[in-house]
Image (tube, rainbow, N blue to C red):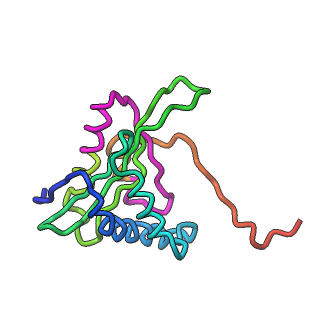
Amino acid sequence: MNDASVRRTIAADVPALQRLWAELIDHHAEGDSYFTPSAGAVGLHGARLHEELGREDRLILLAEEKSEPVGFVIAEIRPGPDLFLVGPYGFVRDLGVTQSARGLGIGHRLYEAALEWFAEHGVRRAELDVTEANEVARRFWSGYGYRRLYTRMIVDLTDFEP
């Protein structure tokens, strides 16, 4: 494992988080055009991050190696659906590590910090979304015991004629 540090983010970190998020989204878009970001996506994401900083139900962490941002995780606590007996749960909204720092254990450190935060808040279950095209991520999450709960399916109706 490397010497990367993991810490909570502050407002001054938002530009670095935007760059890391943009790399993550570009990676997803390579696997499926569904994830092609809109022209203003990075700015919108930054504005949302500013709104979320300091919320008690959000955890935004930044990993740095030699003072360079190399990864991040955004986790949140969500209320459970009122139709099922699952209660509040942790949701890993985003986890990304720069291409140059992958394979160094940074993703594991970020996720395990999120797990700690979930446990501190009494959360007993965690969920996340992972794209079908991202086989590496599916293996990563399966290694932590995640399993498929359902499959979201999409169809492009551009050429549909009733």
**Residue 15 vertical position relative to residue 90 in the rendered view, above or below:** below
Whether residue 8 appears in magenta in the rendering, the answer is no
Q: Nearer the viewer, residue 161 or 147?
A: 161
Q: Nearer the viewer, residue 124 or 136?
A: 124
Residue 120 percent coordinates (x, y): 27, 31
Q: Which corner quadrant holds the N terminus?
A: bottom left
Q: Quadrant of residue 89?
A: top left
Q: Quadrant of residue 158?
A: bottom right
Q: Quadrant of residue 14?
A: bottom left
Q: Residue furthest right?
A: 162
Q: Residue furthest top?
A: 85
Residue 128 percent coordinates (x, y): 44, 46
**Residue 81 vertical position relative to residue 147 in the rendered view, above or below:** above
Residue at 49%, 71% in the rendered image: 29
**Residue 123 vertical position relative to residue 22 in the rendered view, above or below:** above
- What residue range appears in magenta? 113-138
**Residue 6 vertical position relative to residue 101 in the rendered view, above or below:** above
Label count reads: 0
Residue at 58%, 48% in the rendered image: 151
Residue 157 is left or right of residue 139, and the answer is: right
Residue at 49%, 63% in the rendered image: 133
Residue 30 percent coordinates (x, y): 47, 73
Q: Nearer the viewer, residue 85 or 6?
A: 6
Q: Which corner quadrant holds the C terminus?
A: bottom right
